[in-house]
Image (cartoon, helix red, strand yellow):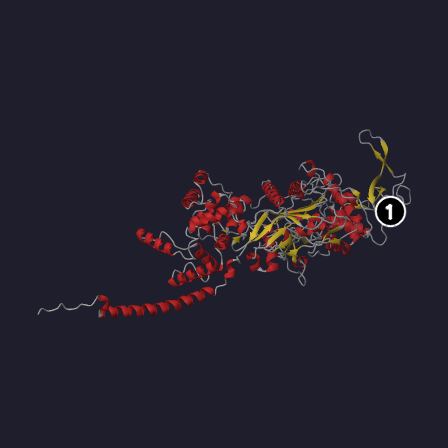
Amino acid sequence: MWDLPRYKPPFYRRTWFLSVFTLLAALIVVGGIFVAIERDQWQKRAAAFDYKKLEDMESASIIFDRNGQVLGRIFIQNRDQVAADQLSPWLYKSVVAAEDIRYYQHNGVDYYGIVRAAVRNYQAGRTRQGASTLTQQLARNSFPIELPSEDRSYKRKLLEIFVAQEIERRFSKPKILELYLNRVFFGDGFYGAESAARGYFGKHAKDVNLSEAAMLAGLLKSPNRLSPWRNHKACMEQRNFVLGRMLELQQISREEYDATISQDLVVKNRRSIHQESYPMDLVAQQVIGQFGRDAAISDGYRIYTTIDGDLQRKAEKALKEQLDVVERHEGYDHQRFGKYDIDFRAHQRMASNEVEGNTLPPPAYLQGSIVVLDNATGGILTLVGGRDFGHSSYNRALAARRPAGTAFKPFVYAAAFERGFGPGTIVQDTVIDNRQVMIGGVTGILGEWGPERVDNKYEGSISAREALVKSKNAATVRLGMMTGLDHVIPLAKAAGIESPLRPFPATFLGSSEVTLMEMTLANTAFPDGGTRPDKAFIIQKIEDQAGNVVFEAKPSKVRVMKDTTAYEIHTCLSDVLERGTADKAYTELGLKKFPLGGKTGTAYNFTDAWFLGYSSAVTCGVWAGFDKPSTIYRGAFSNEIALPIWAEVMKSTFANYRPKEIPQPKGIIKVELCSVSGQLATDKCFETVENKETGEKVQKRTTFFEISTEDQAPKVGCEVHNGGANRSFVKVIPGEEWPRAALAVDVSAVPIVAMKQPTVIGVDPYNSIQSVNNAKAMSSLEGQTAPVNSSAIVTPAPDNGTGPEQMEVRRAEPVQPMREQTVLDTTIKPPPLPPLDF
């Protein structure tokens, strides 16, 4: 009997296999349970995210000018969020082709793409291809704190996967693409397709064509490296790659591909997205003050300003060009803009290259500022706070308080006209004791720099109109004294000058420090019938992203003076341009003869040059000087420094702000007055004068016609030519005239002024010397000592050891601002003097 073969069970019945299988099965079950538990935990973590953040993006607040042009933005991320229908269909297709070709097949995670990327990266020996889907990129961009890109751990990657899947469950594919295109970074500071399209192409995202869409999609790979402004060739190559992918995916036809790939890419000239300027800085401060910093930079407000963008640019250009001319004057010996700008740019390059260097000091070159206001509302049409915002953000138009000089005179005359004086009132244009005014010293004779010329003549008895038109200092002081500081200062305050005005006669000649904005606002009363806007403002209205108006300006008017007074001042300031201190505006600077008015303003010692002028529509103020007060150059009158800037700016306003005739109000009458007495003219108002050519004596009429009101007009006829009064008669207003004894000074006993230094040296309470980063409201001066009280008066030049009793008392001469003084027949002739050193 043979042996049967031994039975061998199949391997799956063998003990070792069953043992291994059982163990593996147990591990799989346990692992599955563990994975299920872990998956549940990751899903819960992902579900806990606030997915409203995907739609709640930080959007830049956009600032518009009065014509709807974008002035600039306030932002952390420069983004304009738009709806799906505001995005070009080409953008959707090109982004899918460039970033996620299986976008419509996966649920947020492309597992096939992960395997494909792993194989290709393994073959290349380095990471060459990523596997993140559009949804995963959206997750990272939307939750940068929870899913930081720099965290490469598996936990962060797992959480990103579950967040992406959660996004896919909550939003549709088209909505995810919309959110993606609104959020991602396209380089050069542009976030979102709308911002990028406007920045690169100057058009809305809905209007971009195939080529432009392919370029934007190509930028996403490396936004800064592929920037068309930095590397146009690489940008074009990436655009062509995207077009090729779109052709492969049959998103475009061969004809569209061939036509597009042969086109060059045209992008706008690069412009800084920050667009820093003085108007932008002021707007940003006010919006942040109103809504808070976080809301201002991220809530996407639409801010509509009163600024005229074109006029702003022309004003900035006019200021720079004219001050460049001033710096070329032979007497100018200060820092120049061009030299500082070279140093500034070199310093910037060092900073950008992280090279340490010395701190660049603030600019010390000649500065200037311009304000243009809408007379009807007070809206700021133009705001120039300096020659270059990059050099210094200190806004001199708002924050720098400087002596207004002779530009303040119209308010002295307005107060006088309010009190019963008129344009025809006779005032004395003769030397005046400087002890009454104390400008340039505490003794001597008051200087006559107001007429803006070196050959000024004293004219004796002149009308108030002539005194203002010719900017006579002595005559203005006399009229101011007769009017009273207690009337001049309140009127100036009512006009909008909030800076402290010192209660001394020097204020009549603008010795008190004021801002350009205050002076410009105050001057709007003259062309507008004695009223002015209650305040100057720059923001017209603000809308939120939904279009709701959250702020709107409500301008109103303030009465400053009678309409008749305003009209009288206007006619005087119109004569300033026609035949007075600013006549070169018409004769040399090309200004058309529209109904305009204006006043020059030169401060003592030529430290500040002003011009304030207006049309019926706008008022423009110009200032020029140094941040640290210093003489611009000897003889630097405002009609040479500030007037050309004003004329250029005003010429730019005529097209859109056409001047109209300023109407004469009721109550204005015309009267004939005697130029000798200031009283009503009679048929006897004649003088005998000698014809210089023939020697013949003839009778000359001594009358002139002048506008007035019934209250201002004299009530009696001329008493000089009718007898009963002497030839030195001056119109007397009972109880109101400054005592004539105070005006009739014995000038032979007054020593001349020979100053060696500027008159007043002291603290700088208005911070006009030190530049600051941002313009800011001036602090209250209540409780502080007025600047004049905290100053040290500089005494006249030493007398070389001779005491007062031994000093030779010279006959006084008017203080003139030039080294070589021309002796006029109408002045007292003194002995030769050494040149004055201011």
Of residues 66 and 460, the one drawn nearer to the viewer in this rendering: 66
Q: Secondary structure at mark 1?
A: loop
Residue type highlighted by circle 1: Pro
The residue sitting at 50% across, 58% down in the picture is: 54
Q: Is residue 662 left or right of residue 271?
A: right
The residue sitting at 35% across, 53% down in the picture is: 116
Q: Position of residue 708 (x, y in %)?
A: 83, 45
Q: Is residue 422 left or right of residue 519?
A: right
The residue sitting at 52% across, 61% down in the picture is: 52
Q: Is residue 292 left or right of residue 484?
A: left
| Looking at the image, residue 307 lies above or below residue 789 | above
| Looking at the image, residue 622 lies above or below residue 161 | above
Residue 776 in sight in this render: yes
The residue sitting at 83% across, 45% down in the picture is: 668
Q: Position of residue 393 (x, y in %)?
A: 57, 52
Q: Position of residue 199 (x, y in %)?
A: 52, 47
| Looking at the image, residue 448 lies above or below residue 2 | above
Number of disc labels: 1
Tag 1 residue: 714
* Furthest residue in direction top, as rendered: 694
Of residues 380 and 266, the one drawn nearer to the viewer in this rendering: 266
* Furthest residue in direction front, as rendered: 1
Quarter-wise, where is residue 776 in the image? bottom right
Quarter-wise, where is residue 164 in the image? bottom left
Of residues 775 and 85, the one drawn nearer to the viewer in this rendering: 85
Q: Is residue 722 left or right of residue 86?
A: right
Residue 627 in sight in this render: no
Q: Position of residue 663 (x, y in %)?
A: 78, 44
Q: Which quarter of the rendered picture does the N terminus lie within?
A: bottom left
Badge 1 crowding class, 10 Å Cα cut-off, few under 14, some 14 to 19, many 20 or more, is many
